[in-house]
Amino acid sequence: MIENLDDALARAAVIIKDPALIRRIVLSGRQRTLVPPYKRIDIRPVELKGVIYLQVVSHDGKQDFTKNYLPDQFLLVDLVRSGFGNIVVENHEVELSIRITKSGAAQVSVQTASNSKSSASNLSHDRRKHRLLGENEAIFKELGISDKSGKLKPSRTDKFLQVNEFLKSIDHVLSEELKSEKKIAMVDLGCGSAYLTFAAHQYLKNRGFDVTTTGVDTRDDSRAKNTEIAQRSGYSGAISFVAAEISAFPKQQADITIALHACDTASDDALAWAVKSKSRIVLLAPCCHHDIQRQLSDIPHPFGLVTRHGILKERVGDILTDAIRAQVLRILGYRTEVMEFIAGEHTPRNLMIRAVLTGAPAQKRDFEELDSLIKQWGISPVLIKQLESEIETRRHRALS
Ligand SMILES: C[S@@+](CC[C@H](N)C(=O)[O-])C[C@H]1O[C@@H](n2cnc3c(N)ncnc32)[C@H](O)[C@@H]1O
């Protein structure tokens, strides 16, 4: 619903009127012509010596700055005027989101506050939940996910939870597949700032494995920074980082291949790399899906009804991409599941393809299903091109 920005802010002010009932206020993004002073600000109530303050944590992309204000010293309007484009306010009853449009109006959505939502009060609840790697783990301090005292930084909560939930998937396959192994080689493709790389390595180490880990990313600045952290934190020799395109990274032995949000077809590159390297376990949480979305023009009847809506077309593209990825893995001898690895409020990209190499033969029907889907939708998935010779070898075997 579009409304006047002042009206929307007046509604937000009512929701946060009683500071004790605030669950969270989050400011992020930017208005079209303004540059806000921080990337994101998280605000929640804290009680200090019996007095309620609003704790304002401002994140500039590198570090958090925390200040406590008495509620009457705090003015949401001033923060919004400083240039933020997205505002979320939530109390115990309602969550109101405002997105400031190009014309300066407010696109508003209101939802009933849910107990499952990420919020200040739930954050302490989250902290009590079982995590495979706790917030006070040394590597989380080194990576800036937790502060020096080992307390999780509010602006890093989503990343901390993403990493920990990803670890649960590793744990699941580990208990089933690699429990008798001593040595494990792991590769993280599209590792970026290596939060998951370090955390997964540390977790495997804590479980008693002798693990060697390689993080791969195109960005040389990430390689340099991650290598420095590895050296500083005592991981030299055990974790190494390479600046390379995944498709150009030489194949090597990998017990576990992981990839978290490798962009677009980099996820396909990661799957192709894992298959060609005969990785025993593949855990991949894909990111944006543009390859097939771009190819959706000749829509089979009656799905035009679905794809006439932009957002639904995008989702159909996502679903086709991941369904094809899963089927290709199945054909190539992987037992494959597709699941949500984390609740959607921590990342909208919450789907995971989890595959374990069993070598099971493919059936004629597996190819028929895949071929027919591709033909009907008139698409040419990049993963199939990358793994063409492997797929054709399996097809030949299945048909002979
Ligand atoms: C969204 S970030 C995710 C980073 C990290 N896995 C995480 O979840 O925090 C995607 C990363 O993939 C890297 N990337 C994208 N395409 C790549 C490619 N073809 N080869 C290697 N890295 C790639 C980008 O440089 C970026 O660091």
Image (cartoon, rainbow, N blue to C red):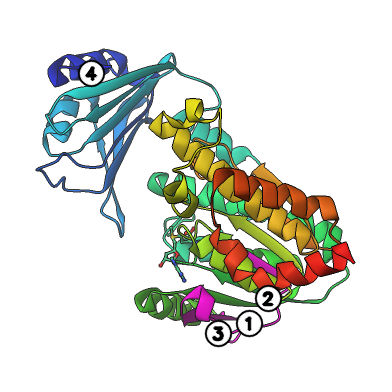
Please report the residue visible at 20 percent of the width from the left and 42 percent of the height from the top.
Answer: 30
Residue 89 in which image quadrant: top left
Which residue is drawn at the image coordinates 77% and 72% (left, top)? 393
The one of 60 and 263 positioned closer to us in this rendering: 263
Assign a secondary structure to mark 2.
Answer: helix
Q: Quadrant of the C terminus?
A: bottom right
- Quadrant in which ligand 1 is drawn: bottom left
Residue with the mark numbered 3 = 236
Mark 4 or mark 1: name the one nearer the start of the chain: 4
Q: Is residue 302 above or below residue 348?
A: above
* Residue drawn where x is 42% and y is 29% of the image: 308
Identify the mark nearer the N-term, 3 or 2. 3
338 in relation to 202, above or below: above
Q: Residues within 10 Å of mark 1 (few under 14, many from 20)?
A: some
Q: Which residue is mark 1?
A: 251
Question: Which element carries disc 4, helix, strand or loop?
Answer: strand
- Quick check: is the Cβ at mark 4 less than 8 Å away from ligand 1? no
Q: Which mark is residue 276?
A: 2
Could you tell which of marks 3 and 4 lies nearer the N-terminus? 4
Identify whether 304 is placed above or below 109: below
The residue to which callout 4 is attached is: 2
Q: Quadrant of the N terminus?
A: top left
Q: Residues within 10 Å of mark 3 (few under 14, many from 20)?
A: few
Check if mark 3's residue and mark 4's residue have beta carbons within 8 Å: no
Q: Find the magenta span and give its range.
A: 235-258
Instruction: For marks 2 and 4, give the CA distance.
Output: 50 Å
Q: Are marks 3 and 2 in contact (CB under 8 Å)?
A: no
